[in-house]
Image (cartoon, helix red, strand yellow):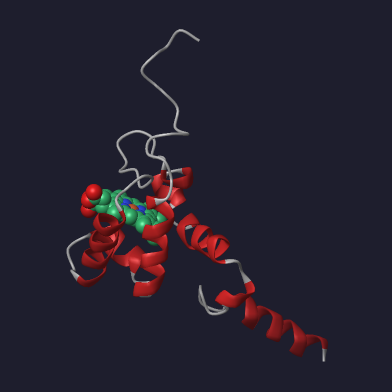
């Protein structure tokens, strides 16, 4: 019995992203989906160093880019990252990042007098 409920719990935690969208407020789900990008593109899409930032992107630009990356086979890392998302989830991610102000939250590395 104990073993069985453990397996059930584990099974639920492995449900694919977005399988139960109604248990989250929409904006929470958008942020949750988008949070997977942060490990490479920076917290809330504010990139550090040479990485491409996502925050403040234009919705159509970003969405088109993501769809492009998903269906073309020439984007290496990103192509594989993006396979995990449905098109409507990519739309939510684009919507989340396009709703953020551009270029804030990152550190300014240009001045060194601190
Ligand atoms: C494992 C690290 C990693 C993760 C996670 C990741 N990316 Fe990327 N992403 C990259 C790298 C590296 C590039 C540059 C690759 C290239 O130029 O081919 C890139 C490029 C991009 C570009 C293209 C930028 C441009 O102007 O051409 C977009 C858009 C993008 N990522 C969006 C996302 C989104 C949205 C997510 C979350 C769903 C995400 N990435 C998750 C590593 C990552």
Q: Is residue 2 above or below residue 52?
A: below
**Residue that sits furthest to the right in the current view:** 1
**Residue that sits furthest to the top in the current view:** 113
User: How many numbered marks does the figure carry?
Assistant: 0
The answer to whether residue 106 is left or right of residue 82 is right
In terms of depth relative to the viewer, which is nearer, 48 or 31? Answer: 31
Q: Is residue 33 above or below residue 55?
A: below
Q: Quadrant of residue 112?
A: top left
The answer to whether residue 77 is left or right of residue 10 is left
In terms of depth relative to the viewer, which is nearer, 32 or 40? Answer: 32
Quadrant where the N terminus is found in the figure = bottom right
Q: Is residue 98 above or below residue 46?
A: below
Q: Quadrant of residue 75?
A: bottom left
Q: Quadrant of residue 61?
A: bottom left
Question: Where is residue 113 drawn, in percent x and y?
Answer: 45, 7
Residue 14 appears in the rendering: no
Question: Where is residue 46 drawn, in percent x and y?
Answer: 41, 40
For the point 36% across and 45% down, which residue is it? Answer: 56
For the point 42% across and 50% down, which residue is it? Answer: 99
For the point 54% across and 66% down, which residue is it? Answer: 26
Residue 105 appears in the rendering: yes
The answer to whether residue 2 is left or right of residue 44 is right
Question: Where is residue 21 drawn, in percent x and y?
Answer: 55, 75
For the point 18% across and 69% down, which residue is it? Answer: 72
Question: Where is residue 106 drawn, in percent x and y?
Answer: 44, 32
In terms of depth relative to the viewer, which is nearer, 101 or 89? Answer: 101
């Amino acid at each position: 019995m104990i073993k069985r409920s453990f397996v059930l719990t584990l099974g639920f935690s492995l449900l694919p992203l977005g399988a139960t969208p109604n248990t989250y407020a929409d904006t929470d789900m958008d942020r949750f989906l988008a949070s997977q990008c942060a490990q490479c593109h920076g917290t809330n899409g504010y990139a550090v160093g040479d990485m491409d930032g996502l925050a403040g992107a234009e919705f159509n630009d970003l969405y088109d880019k993501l769809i492009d990356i998903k269906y073309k086979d020439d984007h290496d890392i990103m192509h594989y990252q993006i396979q995990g998302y449905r098109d409507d989830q990519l739309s939510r991610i684009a919507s989340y990042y396009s709703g953020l102000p551009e270029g804030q939250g990152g550190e300014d590395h240009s001045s060194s007098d601190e």
